[in-house]
């Protein structure tokens, strides 16, 4: 390209500079002219760069020139929306719109105009509209990022880094599910509840006899890391309750919540717990059974009437913890899971509990199968009977009296 302007270029430069002179009162004309001069390099005959040109010819910086160019382009974007009743009148007015993309610029300007009652909005009103649009975009981006992690769930760290707005949007997403989540049918490991539901998976207790960890390490991409699956919150409404069977077998209505987790583990965010309990509250046709090894957290919750709340007591040191925690826990059914029963247990009182489930130890990758002594079982049953507490023997409890006369 020759540094010397040809006559047509000189004519265009004159036209543009005239527009700039007039446009210093009209940012649209000035920005359009400066953009053309920069694009066509009409400054090249006497100036080394566009910044050199605007400094020497017009007395302002390249930054100021870019502001005017950006303002012109934003004005063009807004003007292309035929439904906008008011257009910007100054460069300062549209300056806050610069960080946004075209669609966001149009949206923010429309909101600012609406705030100004269809008059020309102030710079502050435009700035407030920009903040709202950026916040909305941030929520959408966060939600999209989370939805991309659907197969492995949301970790505690990811949840804690999300804004409250993004969490709210996420918790509403399950209502739009097309591939509806449903409960899973259980096997003999959880015979007292014929359904399982895992909106949260993973656990940090690291119990050596945990067979759930073995399953997770084998089949879950996230292994046994605690994660939240909010799209599974729709399962209660999409699972058909076998009403006739439930009339004779209450187990048909029983749903074991978080069989692959501890929902009340000290690492679990309260937001996850609230989301699960809100769902339970909305589906009174089911009984939802909760079980934790951290009962201290139970007194902080408000449980609906269809929640059966339990804790695991496998050894004597858990007895006092369970009794203290459940003295302050309000639930329609309070229960104990003495599975695996690892030693003889002595309770000061079982009157606060409604139900005890007893079981042996199933084989895991870290521990062999184990059956408790019959005397341990008998002693516990006697305590339960004295307190009018119901008893349930699990199929893996194979121990039985083997006594002979002396």
Image (spheres, grey):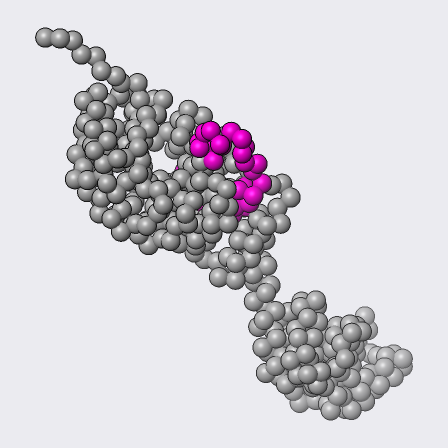
Residue at image point 64% right, 69% down: 100
Majority secondary structure in the magenta region:
helix
Up/down of 172 relative to 356, above or below:
below
Q: Residue 387, position in %: x, y? A: 23, 36
Where does residue 395 sit, x and y in percent of width and height? 36, 22
Judged left or right of residue 234, residue 398 is left
Residue located at (43% from left, 44% from top): 306
Task: Classify 49 as above or below 352.
Answer: below
Quadrant of residue 106 in the image? Answer: bottom right
Residue found at x 34% / y 31% = 210
Residue 227 on the magenta segment: yes
Q: Is residue 230 magenta?
A: yes
Q: Position of residue 116 (x, y in %)?
A: 66, 83
Residue 43 percent across, percent down from the top left: 76, 80
* Residue that lies at the very extreme toward the right in this rendered image: 7
Task: Find the magenta span and give its range.
Answer: 224-253
Identity of the residue drawn at 22% across and 15% down: 401
**Visible in this render: residue 43?**
no
Q: The C terminus appears in which quarter of the rendering?
A: top left
Q: Does 326 appear above or below 136?
A: above
Task: Work out whether residue 271 or residue 52 is closer to the camera in this orientation and state it.
Answer: 271
Residue 336 placement: quadrant: top left
Looking at the image, residue 1 sits to the left or right of residue 47; the answer is: right
Residue in front for this viewpoint, 197 or 95: 197
For the question of whether residue 323 can be seen, the reply is: yes
Displayed quadrant of residue 346: top left
User: Quick check: 378 left or right of 131?
Assistant: left
Instruction: Between residue 47 and residue 282, name the one nearer to us.
Output: 282
Quadrant location of the N terminus in the rendered image: bottom right
Front residue of 123 and 276: 276
């Amino acid at each position: 390209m020759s540094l010397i302007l040809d006559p047509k270029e000189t004519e265009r430069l004159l036209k543009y500079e005239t527009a700039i002179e007039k446009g210093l009162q009209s940012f649209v004309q000035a920005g359009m002219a400066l953009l053309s001069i920069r694009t066509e390099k009409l400054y090249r005959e006497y100036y080394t760069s566009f910044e050199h040109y605007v400094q020497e010819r017009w007395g302002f910086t390249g930054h100021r020139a870019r502001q005017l160019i950006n303002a012109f382009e934003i004005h063009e974007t807004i003007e292309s929306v035929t439904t906008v009743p008011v257009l910007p009148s100054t460069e300062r007015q549209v300056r806050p719109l610069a960080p946004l993309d075209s669609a966001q610029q149009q949206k923010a300007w429309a909101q600012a105009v609406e705030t100004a009652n269809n008059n020309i909005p102030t710079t502050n009103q435009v700035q407030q509209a920009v903040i709202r649009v950026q916040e909305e975009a941030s929520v959408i981006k966060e939600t999209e990022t989370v939805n991309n992690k659907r197969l492995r769930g949301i970790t505690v760290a990811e949840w804690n880094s999300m804004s409250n707005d993004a969490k709210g949007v996420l918790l509403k997403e399950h209502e739009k599910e097309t591939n509806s989540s449903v409960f899973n049918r259980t096997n003999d490991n959880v015979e007292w509840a014929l359904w399982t539901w895992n909106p949260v998976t993973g656990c940090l207790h690291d119990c050596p006899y945990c067979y759930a960890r073995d399953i997770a390490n084998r089949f879950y991409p996230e292994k046994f890391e605690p994660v939240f699956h909010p799209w599974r919150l729709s399962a209660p409404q999409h699972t058909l309750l076998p009403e006739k069977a439930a009339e004779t077998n209450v187990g048909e209505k029983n749903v074991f919540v978080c069989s692959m987790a501890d929902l009340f583990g000290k690492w679990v965010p309260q937001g996850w717990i609230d989301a699960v309990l809100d769902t339970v509250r909305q589906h009174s046709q089911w009984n939802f059974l909760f079980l934790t090894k951290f009962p201290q957290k139970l007194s902080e919750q408000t449980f609906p009437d269809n929640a059966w709340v339990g804790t695991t007591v496998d050894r004597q040191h858990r007895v006092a913890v369970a009794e203290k925690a459940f003295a302050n826990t309000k639930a329609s059914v309070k229960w104990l899971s003495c599975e695996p029963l690892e030693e003889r247990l002595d309770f000061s009182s079982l009157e606060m509990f409604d139900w005890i489930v007893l079981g042996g130890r199933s084989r895991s990758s870290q521990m062999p199968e184990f059956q408790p002594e019959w005397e341990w079982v008998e002693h516990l049953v006697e305590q339960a009977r004295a307190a009018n507490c119901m008893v349930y023997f699990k199929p893996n409890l194979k121990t039985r009296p083997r006594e002979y006369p002396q």
